[in-house]
Structure formats: C-alpha cells, structure tokens
Amino acid sequence: MSTSSDTGITYELLATCPHTGARRGRMHTRRGVVETPAFMPVGTQGSVKTLGCEDLEAMGFKHLLANTYHLSLRPGSDLVQRMGGLHQFMGWQGSILTDSGGYQVMSLSEMNKVSDEGVLFRSHLDGREIFLTPERSIQTQAELGVDIAMMLDQCPPYPCSRDEAAKAMERTHLWAPRNLAARSDGQAIFGIVQGGVHEDLRRESVDAITSLPFDGFAVGGVSVGEPTEMQYPVVTLTAPLLPSDKVRYLMGVGHPKDILHAVASGIDLFDCVLPTRMARHHCLYTLNGRINIAAKKWAEIQGLPDHGSEFPVVNRYSAAYLRHLFKAGEALGPRLASLHNLWFYSRLMSEIREAISSGTWPELLARYSLA
C-alpha cells in the first residue's frame, strides 16, 4: 500500500507485526528513502551537538530534525536560503524535518503572547519582538528548504486544565487551514493532533486534522512533563486513528521503552534530544538500561560499559577512559558518549524493523530487558 503526492513524501507499508499494531514501512522523500520505524537525531540549530554529518551518515541515519524558531533567529532563514538551503548550509545529504516553532509556544510561554492570529515572541537572544503566524512559520520553513514542514500548532503544557487543553486544540484547528494555504509549490506539511490527556479531545482533534490534505500526521502534546502512565494511553488511542496510508509521527518521545510502546501502537517516526543531551550529562544507553559513566564503579573498568554494544569508533575506548574524560572536562567525553548513544538508537530502530518483519517482537523486548 502506498500514497503519492507532488510533495515527494509517500508512505509504503511493508509489514505489520503479528503480535502488535507495529508497522514496518518506508517513507519516500525527494532526498531518498527512510526505513521506518525511524528515529530522527535532533539538530535544533542545524547541528546535532558534538557530531558532524559524516558521523550521522556512518550510523545509518537518513533523516534529522531542526528547529524553525531557533534557525529563524540565528542565522536567519533568509541567510540560509541564500546559502542554498539548510541541507547545503550544514552539509547534510539526507532529508530534514523542521519543527514549526509550536513547541516554543509552550516552552517559552513566559516570553510570548498567544492569540488567534499567532504568537508574539520576545527573542531569547536579544529581546526583539517576533510575530510568528502559521503563514510565517510555513514561509520560514520553505526558505530553509527542508523536506517536511510541521504545521504551527499550540502545544498545551502539563499540567493544564481541560479547558486550557481544549482551547489549545481549537486554536490548532483554527490554524491548520492557514498553514496549508501558505504552502509553497511542492512543500510537504504534516498536521498535528492535540487534545492533551483527554480521550474525547484527542478523537475530536484526529477528526479535524485528518480531514485536511496534510502529507503526514503527528501526535503532539506528549512528552511535555506528564507521567508515563498518562502518556501511554494517549499514544495507544491516537496512533491507530491516524490514516494508515501516511506517516505517523510521535513528537518529542525518545526513551527506548517509550519508543517500543509507541511502535507497538502504530507510530513510524520519532525525534528526541535524549540520546545526545544525556550523553553530555555522562549517561549511556545500554541493553540493561541507562548508566552513569561518571560513577566511581567505572574508574578501573578496562572493558566496555556495555559488552552487548560494540559500536564502530567508540569500542576502542574503555569505560575507565570515558569516565576520565568527563572527570577531566575533556570535550571528547560528550562526543564519544553521543556517538555511543546514537549508535545504540540506530541499532534499536534497525532491530525493531527486523522484529516486525520476522515476527520476533517478544524476543526484541527480552533483548532490551523490557519483557
């Protein structure tokens, strides 16, 4: 099964897990094929911290995320456009999806004012006022030249009242047609479902957003501080309601166990800062969970911190050496930890895809100590 459009974004379903609702597929873009389920490293300002594009390519990543709000402030989307677009500017050969700035509506709420017209920001860099509308967000993403633009939405915080969640959802619905009306020729845009933790609002939002001709659909408003036991029901409910012939994207979720749950619910695409952010805080992901490599227990360990994870480039360095780098404040420490974590995520996604195709989902959960 596949869909087609003049935006270059199509989804091809290859297999469905016999144990869950997990989907094995391919997202086709103008810059190549992304095997799904897939994880996008986060390059907020056109850079995945401590890593170069050659590192990401060596790990097998074909798709990454950048942020419209931050790039519009520095260096400016007009400059990026003059430099040939974000791909050429940063030297990235794969595809790029950009957040719309909607997350900053929530995360920078003390520095903005939201109305039905748009969001008035005060720049966190120099204090100047910026008025971000759905039209301006889509135009900015067109100037960046990315493969997939996200619609500007309003992401409610957690906790918030039901009325606040409903109002954010209604404003998201109000803005949705304006996002589409502003698209450039051939520009791909994904719609975003909101509704907080409320089942009826999520169903209402799915109906409203999927009635519009977006090129893919995202579940937004999760991983905003809510407990996992409140996140999972939202994902379990919402993912299967999204069109089966288009990509399903869960925004901002990236803990390995959360990815496995969401994949089982039918999600195809993920992004999260966790693997690189935690790496900078001396945390490594392993088959037995997350470890603190700066802990004293690693001080004289000559081997790897995770013998089940021997990755190119990093497997020559011992746990003791990596701990030393962090203790000494050496920049190589965060870089090696970032490489380890993204190799771990790359392998996780590859093994997820294989488990869906081969029907070995229970064995996959056991391997990642989640059975």
Image: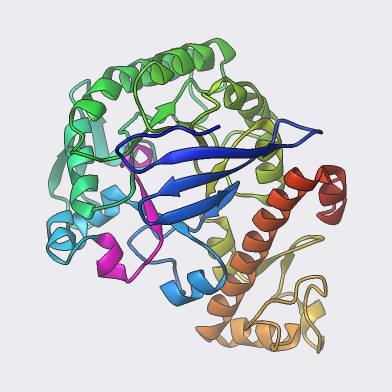
Q: Quadrant of the N terminus?
A: top right
**Relative to 345, is 10 on the left or the right?**
left
Could you say which is closer to the camera, residue 273 or residue 357? 357
Residue, x 82% and y 75% (percent of image)? Answer: 307
Q: Is residue 40 left or right of residue 174?
A: right
* Residue 290 sits above or below residue 196 on the image: below
- Residue 299 x, y percent position in the rendering: 77, 85
Q: Quadrant of the C terminus?
A: top right
Asked whether residue 164 is drawn in magenta, I would say no
* Residue at the (41%, 61%) spot, across then down: 94
Q: Residue 125: x percent and y percent?
A: 22, 57
Taking the spot 56% from the left edge, 66% from the top edge, the residue there is: 60
Observer able to see residue 52:
no
Q: Can residue 173 be seen here? A: yes
- Left or right placement of residue 272 versus residue 260 in this view: left
Q: Residue at x 20, y 55 (%)?
A: 73
Q: Is residue 183 above or below residue 212?
A: below
Query: Residue 133, located in which quarter of the rendered image?
Result: top left
Occupied quadrant, residue 19:
top right
Where residue 145 sits in the image (x, y, percent)?
24, 53
Dividing the picture into quadrants, the one containing residue 175 is top left
Residue 107 is left or right of residue 289, and the answer is left
Answer above or below: position of 318 versus 190. Answer: below
Model colouring? rainbow
- Residue 304 placement (x, y as % from top left): 78, 80
Q: Is residue 101 magenta?
A: yes
The range drawn in magenta is: 86-105
In the image, residue 313 sits, relative to residue 14, either above or below, namely: below
